[in-house]
Image (cartoon, rainbow, N blue to C red):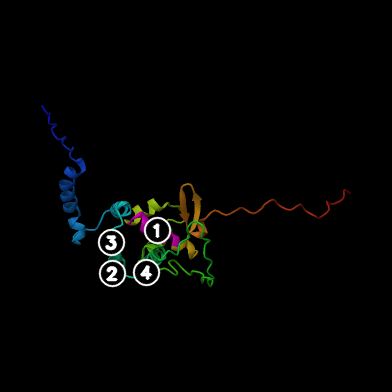
Amino acid sequence: MTQTTAPTATPADPYVAMAAPIRAAFTAAMAPYTNGEAAAPAGLTGILMEAVTAAEPTAELIGMLCQLLTSAAPDADTLSIMHRAMGAALGLGTGPGRPPRTVATAPRPAATGTGGGTRPGSIGARILEVFAASPGAQFTVTELAHELGNGTGATGAAISGLINRGELAMTSEHPRRYAAPAAAPTTAADTTPAESTEDAPEAA
């Protein structure tokens, strides 16, 4: 007599069961911000950027990001991001066994005044306003992102542009902190007074 074995049931994927209600709740929570009815709270953009970074780079995702960048108002931050993305897409980055490319560039003109070289209203200009309001203060990328209500990715890109233009300086690497150039610590010069070369008056 031949015995028949019942097929083993495949366990249900818990993520599939969780996806529908979480997606529905997520869509409802984002509705006021996607419809323009409310301003996004601090940190929300950073969380969404983490999701984009973790997502599989499908053609649909790349297309949505391209449309987002090309429809945004042009400024130093968005143009810098598009420039780096073009380099990555064309394979112009430094890879294994490929020496970095050296490009001769003309020296940048010195920035004049608060926000010099930075488009008014851009993330970079708003970062400079934070430093101008707190003379001598030092901030991390996360602290500035929370202060401005922007994502850490966009804030970090703006900081890189400001450093390249000499409008900000890194004051610490662990953690990375930044300050206005005038507030950045400098090596103290030797302040030991020079010995007097004059002879002491002779005793009478």
Callout in the foreground (3, 1): 3
- Identified by mark 1, the residue type is Val
Callout 4 environment at 10 Å: few (<14), some (14 to 19), or many (20+)? some
Q: Secondary structure at mark 3?
A: helix
Q: Nearer the viewer, residue 117 or 156?
A: 156
Which residue is under mark 1? 130
Report the Cα–Cα distance between label 4 and label 1.
19 Å
- Identified by mark 4, the residue type is Asp
Q: Secondary structure at mark 1?
A: helix
Q: For the point 41% across and 68% down, which residue is it?
A: 118
Q: Is residue 152 magenta?
A: yes
Q: Secondary structure at mark 4?
A: loop
Callout 2 environment at 10 Å: few (<14), some (14 to 19), or many (20+)? few
Q: Nearer the viewer, residue 71 or 202?
A: 71
Q: If you read the primary sequence from the N terminus, does the residue marked by circle 4 or circle 1 appear first?
A: 4
Q: Secondary structure at mark 2?
A: helix
Report the Cα–Cα distance between label 2 and label 3.
18 Å
Q: For the point 38% across and 58% down, which residue is it?
A: 155
Which residue is under mark 2? 71
Which residue is under mark 3? 59
- Give coordinates of residue 62: x percent, y percent: 30, 62
Quarter occupied by the N terminus: top left
Q: If you read the primary sequence from the N terminus, does the residue marked by circle 2 or circle 3 appear first?
A: 3
Q: For the point 38% across and 51% down, which residue is it?
A: 142
Report the Cα–Cα distance between label 3 and label 4.
26 Å
- Give coordinates of residue 147: x percent, y percent: 35, 54
Report the Cα–Cα distance between label 2 and label 4.
12 Å
